[in-house]
Image (spheres, rainbow, N blue to C red):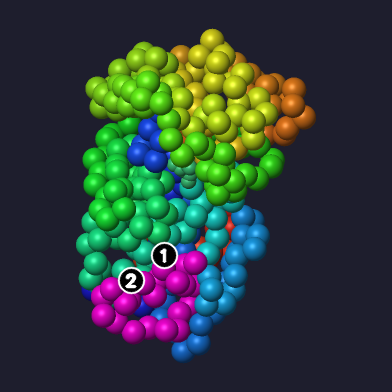
Amino acid sequence: MRHERVRVKVPASTANLGPGFDSLGMSLELYAYIEMSFADQTEIELFGDNMEGVPLDKSNLIYEVAQMVFAEAGEHHPELYIGMCSDIPLTRGLGSSASAIVGALVAANALIGGKLSADRLFQLASQLEKHPDNVGASLFGGIVVAFWDGARAEHIRLEPHIDMDVLVAIPSFQLATEKARHVLPQSVALSEAVFNLSHSSLLVAAFATGNLAMIRHAMQDRLHQPHRAALIPGMTEILEHAVQHGALGAALSGAGPTMLALVDARSGRRSELESFLRDTFAKHQIEVDIRLLRPCLTGVQVLSVEQSVCTLLELAKGEYAV
Ligand code: HSE
């Protein structure tokens, strides 16, 4: 079925979850919305916050990604209407660029009647991002375990434990992924590699079996977090002490600077953990926005614009939740 105009709701994501560098991701209930239709002349409208520096011409990422989908499907649609609003803060480690890529792929594919498979969209998204963790989570929802070997991406989706909540502490400063990757070494000792693969494997097993008590042991990393610590004041203290303040485990969210703490919703220790995260950053004069987010179970969704009760502008203003 071809849509006249599509609206796509695409979740944020957190990557790595500590040891699963470039291979583990989890989708979060924080969303970007993209509308798309064929047009006589290209028009790009942005609504609300989190849109700084987003181009309004054909160099726009969403436009470019949509054109990739049409080219792949053998169709030609050079002129598009694109509308977007987003609650996902930019360059904070919550997968905003992956959400834009996934949203663009899915919206463009819906416009041409879903010619490309979900797997093909995942391959394209992984090639664009160069790692499958964020895009996999935004596409499939839940927890995604994945690799991308430069040619192909494979994944398995896991259902997050129903009582596992996610606290994110989003610092007021931005950190470009490129900068946070630049500080990483090109090679590591075998012992460090073994440390990470054993912890990452155990973490996946803990998620798969719902063993929340194992997360604190498994959520340890030596590949990227120690190298990124200098870029995020307070990070090392949070990683070392979050469990004492009620976390199941803590990690840098993606390339940062957001910190992530998993918490058992039944533990009653959420506010203690929240204070710990806020106070630790405050010691370094860093303001944080702390949010409790549930894992998003659905992944990206195509919504019908015709049936929707509100416009993107109303969504951006927070007047509706859909
Ligand atoms: N896995 C990536 C990284 C996520 O840690 O650099 C950032 O997009």
Type of the residue with mark 2: Val
Q: Of marks 1 and 2, which one's residue comes earlier in the chain?
A: 2
Q: Secondary structure at mark 2?
A: helix
Residue 4, position in %: x, y? 36, 78
Q: Is residue 63 above or below residue 213?
A: below
The residue furthest right is 285
Residue 187, position in %: x, y? 43, 35
User: Residue at (65%, 60%) from the top-left corner?
Assistant: 52
Residue 79: say if magenta.
yes
Residue 110 location, quadrant = bottom left
Residue density around tag 2, few if under 14, some if 14–19, many if 20 or more, within 10 Å: many
The residue furthest bottom is 40
Gap between marks 1 and 2 measured at Cα: 9 Å
Q: What quarter of the picture does the N terminus occupy?
A: bottom left
| Ligand 1 neighbours mark 1 (CB distance < 8 Å) | no
Q: Secondary structure at mark 1?
A: helix
User: Residue at (55%, 44%) from the top-left corner?
Assistant: 182
Is residue 167 shown to the viewer in this render? no
Type of the residue with mark 1: Ala
Q: Is residue 294 left or right of residue 172?
A: left
User: Residue at (55%, 16%) from the top-left corner?
Assistant: 240
Residue 232 location, quadrant = top right
Is residue 63 shown to the viewer in this render? yes
| Residues at circles 1 and 2 in contact by the CB criterion of under 8 Å | yes
The residue beneath circle 2 is 69
Residue 38: say if magenta.
no
Q: Which residues are magenta?
A: 61-83
Q: Which mark is residue 206?
A: none
Residue 316, position in %: x, y? 59, 58
The residue furthest top is 244
Q: Which mark is residue 104?
A: 1
